[in-house]
Amino acid sequence: MGRVRRRAEMFVGSRVGGPAVGDDRTMLVEFLRAQRATLELKCGGLDVELSRRSVEPSTLSLLGLIRHLADVERRWFRQVLAGQDAPARFVSDANPDGDFDGATSDPACAAEAWDAWRAEVAFAERFVAGAPDLDLTGEDSWRGTVSLRWVLVHLVEEYARHNGHADLLRERIDGAIGL
């Protein structure tokens, strides 16, 4: 491979998404898998640096993103689609920004966040694999009735937006780009 001249040339390989032709489930699952893999790569090899904030007064950090996305996965798949009584792990009515505000440099905080995120992703993957079709619905207090198809599209969008934040956060931490 020759010299990379543009940042966009650095993003190749398995994170681009799945097949360009196929059924909706395969494409959506693969695009979401690629977005999740991007988050892991952006955070890879970091420890306490995960909690480093972007710029004041923002509380945005890579660790906050992991915690936030764990709660996002939990909300849409466990609460809305599976109908489980599964309270958020990091946010509450008393601390609605707990996902970001609680992202500290304590290594136990990072370990807890990764464990939570991986558990929620695993649940979501099992749920989607077992769903009869993408028209399965759940009730959400914010959106009303939503389909599994809508949730998958929304999660791809949610991860893509936050992976853009992760690009900038990681570059600020150690100059790494193109991960």
Image: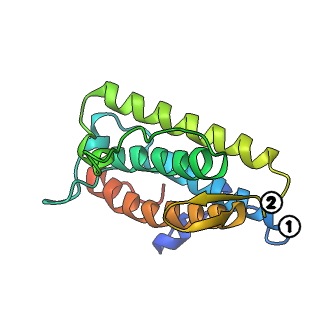
Does residue 44 appear left or right of residue 171 in this picture? right
Q: Position of residue 91 (x, y in %)?
A: 34, 45
Extreme left residue here? 56
The mark found on residue 23 in the picture is: 1
Secondary structure found at label 2: helix
Label 2 sits on what residue type?
Thr
The mark found on residue 50 in the picture is: none
Secondary structure found at label 1: loop
User: How many residues crowd mark 1 within 10 Å: few (<14), some (14–19), many (20+)?
Assistant: few
Q: Are marks 1 and 2 in contact (CB under 8 Å)?
A: yes
Residue that carries the numbered disc 2 in the rendered image: 26
Label 1 sits on what residue type?
Asp
Q: CA distance from mark 1 to mark 2?
A: 6 Å
Q: Is residue 35 above or below residue 41?
A: below
**Residue at the image point whose x is 74% and y is 49% from the top:** 128
Q: Is residue 3 visible in this depiction of the protein?
A: no
Q: Which quarter of the rendering shows the N terminus?
A: bottom right
Q: Is residue 6 above or below residue 134?
A: below
Q: Is residue 56 visible in this depiction of the protein?
A: yes
Name the foreground residue: 13 vs 72. 72
Q: Position of residue 103 (x, y in %)?
A: 28, 40
Q: How is the image coloured?
A: rainbow
Extreme top residue here? 108
**Residue at the image point whose x is 56% and y is 60% from the top:** 140
Name the foreground residue: 176 vs 105. 105
**Residue at the image point whose x is 24% and y is 34% from the top:** 105
Name the foreground residue: 176 vs 17. 17
Q: Position of residue 126 (x, y in %)?
A: 73, 40
Q: Position of residue 26 (x, y in %)?
A: 80, 60
**Residue at the image point whose x is 43% and y is 61% from the top:** 162
Does residue 9 appear left or right of residue 113 in this picture? right
User: How many residues crowd mark 2 within 10 Å: few (<14), some (14–19), many (20+)?
Assistant: few
